[in-house]
Amino acid sequence: MKKIFLVTVSVCIIFALYLMLNEERETRDSIPFRTNSYIEGLRIVHKKDGQNSWTLRSQRADLSQSETVAHMDRVTINLTKENLILKADRGLYNLDNKNLTLEGNIKAHTKDYVITAESLGWKSSTGELVTDGSIQMYGKKFMVEGNGMRVTPGQKVRLLKNVKAIFYP
């Protein structure tokens, strides 16, 4: 009788763990992705007036079941005119509205400064670059950090909260 009770309790515990782990995985992956549809070496080139405006590269992109969202790994974006290279661990690119969300170890480099963040979003319709998370910008003669950022198409940068700045001579 004691063995049956222990086996029954063990099976219940294993089943409960399975349900908890499965539920956690489902909440992490809110967009259903097909495991058999992916692109290796994704490259998207945006041209303006016949010239490359920006190039997005990703080591791998998994497509959603609706094939409207690409979940990308190891993303690199080269903004030709601004001479800026941006890298991130992950990204989501909506093929319908052209919006882009980047996450994980984001680092943008130019010859004069570096920007780091944990998340960034680009709204194609407005041309805005946004984040609600922490952001740091530093160059040879300055360091600025804060929480939340909005960048307009005219390159007007606005940090929203807890802004700290240090300028060096």
Image: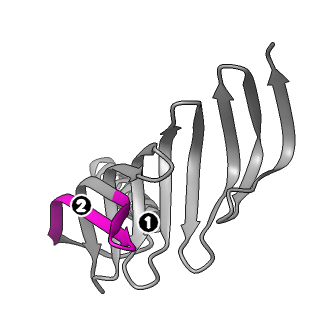
Of residue 66 and residue 117, the one placed in the foreground of this image is 117
Q: Which mark is residue 23?
A: 1
Q: Please name the colour scheme applied to the rendered image.
A: one colour
Which quadrant of the figure has residue 18? bottom left
Q: Which mark is residue 128?
A: none
The local crowd at label 2, few if under 14, some if 14 to 19, many if 20 or more residues have their Cα within 10 Å, is some
Q: Position of residue 45 (x, y in %)?
A: 30, 65
Q: Against 83, is 99 above or below?
A: below
Residue at horizontal 24%, vertical 61%? 43
**Which residue in the structure is indicated by mark 2?**
43
Mark 1 falls on what kind of element? helix
**Labels 1 & 2 near each other (Cβ < 8 A):** no
Q: Is residue 143 left or right of residue 106?
A: right
The C terminus lies in which quarter of the figure?
A: top right
Q: Position of residue 36 (x, y in %)?
A: 13, 71
As shown in the figure, which amino acid type bears the numbered disc 2? Arg
